[in-house]
Amino acid sequence: MPFDQALRFASIWLASTSFIGLTLGAGLPEWLAVLTGAALIVALLRNAGGKSVGRLATYALISTTGWNLLVIVGFLGFWVDMLWVSGELLPAGVHFLMILMIIKLFNLKRRRDYLHLYAISLVAILAAGSLTTDLWYLPIFLLYLFVGVWTLLLFQLTKHPEESGILTMSVAMRPQPLASVSQVTPQFFWLANGLALATFGLTVVIFFTIPRVGAGFYQKGFGENIRTSGFSETVNLGEIGPIKRDPSVVMRVELSDGPPQEAGRLYLRGVAFDQYDGKAWTNRLNHRRAVSEDAVGTFVLRSSRSLATPRLGDTIRQNILLEPLDTPVLFAAPLVERVSGKFPSVQSDLTGSVYLPFPSSSRIEYSVLSRSNPVLPEDLGAEPSVYPESVIRHFLQIPSQPERIAVLAKEITHTQRTIYDKATAIHSFLTHNFRYSLDAPLAEQDQPLEEFLFTRKTGYCEHYATAMVIMLRTIGIPARLVTGFLATEWNEYGNYYVVRQQDAHAWVEVHLPHSGWITMDPTPPSIESIGSGSPAWHALGRMLDTIRLQWGRFFVQYSAADQLAVVRELKAGSTSARNKAFDSISTLFSPFMAMFGGMAGYASKGTIQSLAELLIPTLIGLAVLLWLGIRRPWVKGMISKKTTRDEQVIMQLYGRMIGHLARKGIAKLTAMPPLEFVRLTQERWSNAGSAVASITDLYCRARFGQISPTREELSLAEDHLRDLMTLEKP
Amino acid sequence: MNSTDIIRAIQENIARVIKGKPQVIEMSLVALLARGHLLLEDVPGVGKTTLAHSLAKSLDCSFKRIQFTSDLLPSDIVGVSIFNRQKQAFEFMPGPIFANIVLADEINRTTPKTQSSLLEAMSEAQISFDNKTYPLNQPFMVIATQNPAEYHGTFPLPESQLDRFLMRLRIGYPSPEEEKKVLDRPQSLHPAEELRPLLATHDVLLLQDQVDRVLMDESITDYLLAIVQRTRQSDLLSLGVSTRGALALSRAAKALSLVRGRTYCLPDDIKELAPIVLSHRIMVARTQGLHQRNFEQAERIIQDLVDSIPVPV
């Protein structure tokens, strides 16, 4: 493809990319999007040489005055738009920008028109960046960067088409096709792509290192708030069930100690409930007190297990990224020992639940150290034991209800001796005789528990949990209902659990005299929860989720503090720090590589903040690379300045040479053109011939060919002149 | 291989046939690349026809030769309509002008009527016949020859037609050494037949397009115009150079720059080309007492004139 055609293509693609960015960012009304899209397609087809379209477009051409009038109308429309229709600067400006782009697309005649188009595209992609922070912006922006490098390269190279005047030969005598510089050759193709990649690499480096400003103007504190239920003061039976159809992601839990639990499940405890009134659970022990802060940002919960012999279970370290929820609860695996995060304070209640002082409106990240609670051997023994008063007071409450639940509980457990065996018996009774269903009745029943146990024998997780708690209490075993999430979806690419709304769950904590509270889940595994669809598709989904996580963590939420940390570590210079920085970058890019392998249409809602911070260093990187990659700067004014200076130098040299030769008796007549004078000199003074020829050649190129000499050529010419001065004429 | 190398290869190719005349070969290429036509004026037997033939051969172009005689008719050049019995209609049979390179041998031997039938073809690159227009092949170049020694029974070309030739060249006798080489060559085969094509017609068009992109500095344009202006004001000349002449000089200078491997024109190009591009477009004043058509004198006048005009520095 010839350069100028390639340039037109690249320019239109550049405009298209920024247009796509704006459209996906929902910055355009439909009619304007359709109009701009049509204009871009027409422009592309025209360039591709579609004859009929080309002719059509020529008919549609309006005179210059007409276009100017259109611009003025568009500008007036912009004011109307801003003052009355949109009422805001950004959308109105974006609309006006697109109108300008359409007008420019039909007026790509001179080189400055191309520059205008680039400027419009740049503003458009910046506007798109300030409209969205979703992940799809990244591929669009990368595409923009890529096409941008191509466009600027081509723009630079088409500047002197006559310099590369080379053509192909197609005669049988020379079978091999001749490479030509004015065409887009494979070498050029890879050079341009390499340059684009290098630009991107440099961008990343600059992004992580250049000091950043607040940019508070762009930071909208948005992020979708997920409505939840079951984590507040009360939970109604049948309330959690409907949530179980919502696949939106609530949190992601990284396990720093490696692979998931053997069962592939992780219970993330939210709130515990002690009081049941026959229909709903409430938490009476909700008096929260602040948790003492160990170090800055680290809060230690005092173990409530001091009454029994402390026997340590396995520790679980979790790194939790929690989406904004309408609850202040901090979820974690039981039992929480230590919470660290950027919180001013953390509260806990008597049931061991952990809270923030108020719900967060943005995504928060915290890490938790939990210790699992195993059943101690003492509890497996037969001897009866005594519960502490506080436990009996709170966790044996039973609502007034039919006798038959208690009868059923006794029936199930009468052969069992120990508390633990009794609990296990009820647990297995529920898991084996009942069926899990999402089509269970709603909460508006008089006696939901009785209905569940004796009539329907099918229900949600909270039915099971409630049944178990009440049955345990009727036989005198303290128990409580716990709500939270059951994480089952392990993401092997990012080593974390994805927890969705549909993973909301309720289960039971049973108090054993020695072990304390242990977790039991009477809900049988759901058949329906096993997802449909091919495993490959699921793997792709997990891959994309990983990328989104890294995107949010490394770019969108990359703050001055993070940057400071990177810089500090780099400054420390330790290999571990360098490895860490390298690791974070490589973790970021490994999923990208995977993404480019198999990314198709992907649209989802991401999160928070603006990307202006990403864009500005990118552009700086682009400029720097172009400066380095192409010897001459691409700002036109700079070129002419440079040319003028070098041209003056070579013309001075030439003038001095003429003067010197005249003194030696070889005068240049006014009617003697330069090359003729060279021949004359060569005839009369053959020793000086080569020096004169080379200086004259440089002079002619600069004076008549507008090809400015390079530094080396200039210094060479100076050497020649010096030699000439010392040369003796015979 | 870039355009300069290709052009050099063609020149060497032709030089294998036309011995010792590199300048003539170079200028004929200039005429071709400038989309011009060539008038070769010299005595018989110095290789006018051979030059045209070998140029066509080197370019993989179609080549036709028309021997101009006093009884030649326009239809012998352009073509004729023949009645087709099957189709019950007249059919146009294209004449020898439908070729890429047309050699019009001894063009001044035919009548002005026939000469003028070349006129449209040369300037418009098309011919009209029976109210219909037929485009000619591209590239299209007419190489006309005429013999300056004989004037008996000739019809000198009118000014309008001379102006349509980009340049007028003389070949001249070769030096004895070169002539010896010509004699040593085997005589059984026409020398031009040995040549192999180096450039396809398509590439010729590309080269012609490249000529348009050769840079001519404003100062050189001014220099060119100064020369043209001087011919119009000179007392020695009764007819100066037309605007078409100025245009021809500019195009020729660009083509010469390309042939010499430059992307820009130099004053040297203009000065070198001025005599051969301009001398057939002017008329020497009667006060000079010589034949108006004395081209040699015209060339000398142009040369003197150019020698007095300052070149841009």
Image: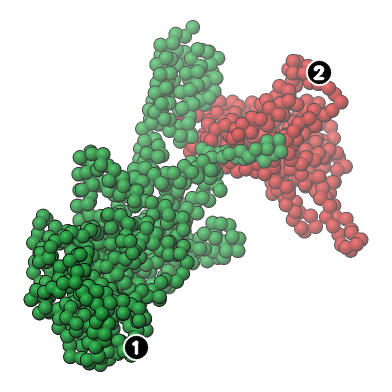
**Letter of the chain that mark 1 sits on in the rendering:** A
Q: CA distance from mark 1 to mark 2?
A: 118 Å
- Residue positioned 38% across, 64% down in the render: A22
Of the pair A695 and A631, the residue shown nearer to us? A631
Res A728 visible? yes
**Letter of the chain that mark 2 sits on in the rendering:** B
- Quadrant of the rendered structure where residue B67 is? top right
Question: In this structure image, what is the colour of chain B?
Answer: red
- Residue positioned 61% across, 31% down in the render: B5
- Quadrant of the rendered structure where residue A167 is? top right
Vertical position of residue A724 compared to residue A671: above or below: above
Vertical position of residue A362 compared to residue B172: above or below: below
> Seen in the image, is B231 located left or right of residue A519?
right
> Seen in the image, is A249 located left or right of residue A517?
right
> Seen in the image, is A2 located left or right of residue A294?
right
Residue furthest to the right:
B85
Asked which secondary structure carries label 2, the reply is: helix
Count numbered badges in the picture. Answer: 2
Q: Chain in green?
A: A
Label 2 neighbourhood size at 10 Å, few (<14), some (14-19), many (20+)? Answer: few
In percent of width and height, residue A428 lies at 31, 76
Q: Amino acid at mark 2?
A: Asp
- Residue positioned 78% across, 43% down in the render: B115
Residue pointed to by mark 1: A456
- Residue positioned 46% across, 45% down in the render: A192
Of the pair B292 and A274, the residue shown nearer to us? A274
Residue pointed to by mark 2: B184
Q: Nearer the viewer, mark 1 or mark 2?
A: 1
In percent of width and height, residue B240 lies at 62, 37
State whether discs 1 and 2 lie on one chain. Answer: no
